[in-house]
Image: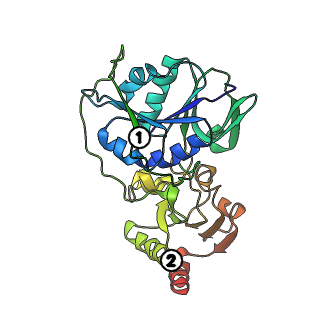
Amino acid sequence: MKQINTVWVFADAADRYADLISGAKKTGAKVNAVVVSEAGVQALRASGPDAVYDLAVAADGCVENYAASLAAVITGEGNLVLLDVTKRSKAFAAALSQKLGAALVNDALSLNPAADGLRVSFRTYGGLAVGTEKVLSANAVVTVSGGVFAPEAAESSADLAVTKVAYVAPANALVVKERRAKAQSAVDLTKAKRVVGVGRGIAKEADLALADALAKAIGAEVGCSRPIAEGEHWMERERYIGVSGVLLKGDVYVALGISGQIQHMVGVNDCGTIIAVNKDKNAPIFNYCDYGIVGDIYKVLPELTKALS
């Protein structure tokens, strides 16, 4: 893929359009946003795409079934499709890449268009390393991790060109058997400048209040290691920090009672400063942190919060 003529942007999570469109503008000559509702069209006016393609809503509203519809309007070569990294977007991306005969790269950390082709970097080996692939196909489909691109203000366009796209049913459609409501998370840790993370050093759920107090004192959000979210279920899944959870890019990360296993540290590698509190002086996290306190979090936290309040 030696030349990117048009970048197409689709997001299952509406709040990802701003950063994806910002990145698209730096990557290709023309940016087309793809939505599945009129409300989505209105929300995009402030993001400044060159055009919007409004996909007709399928009867079941299943995002994964829109691949044939979008593939019908993406013609020629030099097309790059950027999507967010939800499970539905990844399934959509896989189906779309097959329709277009395009290379697919998931969980991209950077996109570097060059004269000899597009190079995409991504985490590999469970987050232990970063790999880079050169895209050789005429078109490409890439899912982009949150925080890779920063949203940028654009001039709002009142006369944004909107093209209606008819629904094209796939040959083998996914069938929705049941829908269950899911509670929406009140936080997006990828956008937080400061985060306090809690791990197994917290003995019981009620003690999370100690972390909340520290977070309030320093203007931070609260996240956690995997066992707290998926083992104890003390915190929502969206607050889990790690290779298969949230990847932080903030200024400060404070780890409380977290041992520092590699699966967790992958999620905080891009933080500016890491501070750790752990009673085990041999905990791996002390090999990664910028500042470390060896001590019982139940004794250290109240004093630390008091000093920072």
Query: In front: mark 2 or mark 1?
Result: 1
Residue at 37% x, 48% y is: 43
Mark 2 or mark 1: name the one nearer the start of the chain.
1
Report how far apart the C-alphas of labels 2 and 1 lie in the structure. Answer: 56 Å
Find residue 177 and report its image quarter.
top left
Q: Quadrant of the N terminus?
A: top right
User: What secondary structure is marked by label 1?
Assistant: loop
Whether residue 24 is situated above or below residue 240 in the rendered picture: above
Quick one: 206 or 110, which is closer to the camera? 110
Residue at 51% x, 86% y is: 306
Residue at 65% x, 61% y is: 285
Find residue 297 and report its image quarter.
bottom right
How is the structure coloured here?
rainbow
**Residue 62 coordinates in the image, percent (x, y):** 32, 30
Residue closest to the far top: 171
Residue closest to the far front: 159
Residue with the mark numbered 2: 298
Whether residue 269 is situated above or below residue 21 in the rendered picture: below
Residue with the mark numbered 1: 160
Q: Three-letter amino acid code at disc 2?
A: Tyr
Q: Three-letter amino acid code at disc 1?
A: Leu
**Residue 221 coordinates in the image, percent (x, y):** 47, 66
**Residue 308 coordinates in the image, percent (x, y):** 54, 83
User: What secondary structure is marked by label 2?
Assistant: helix
Residue closest to the far right: 116
Whether residue 285 is situated above or below residue 293 in the rendered picture: above
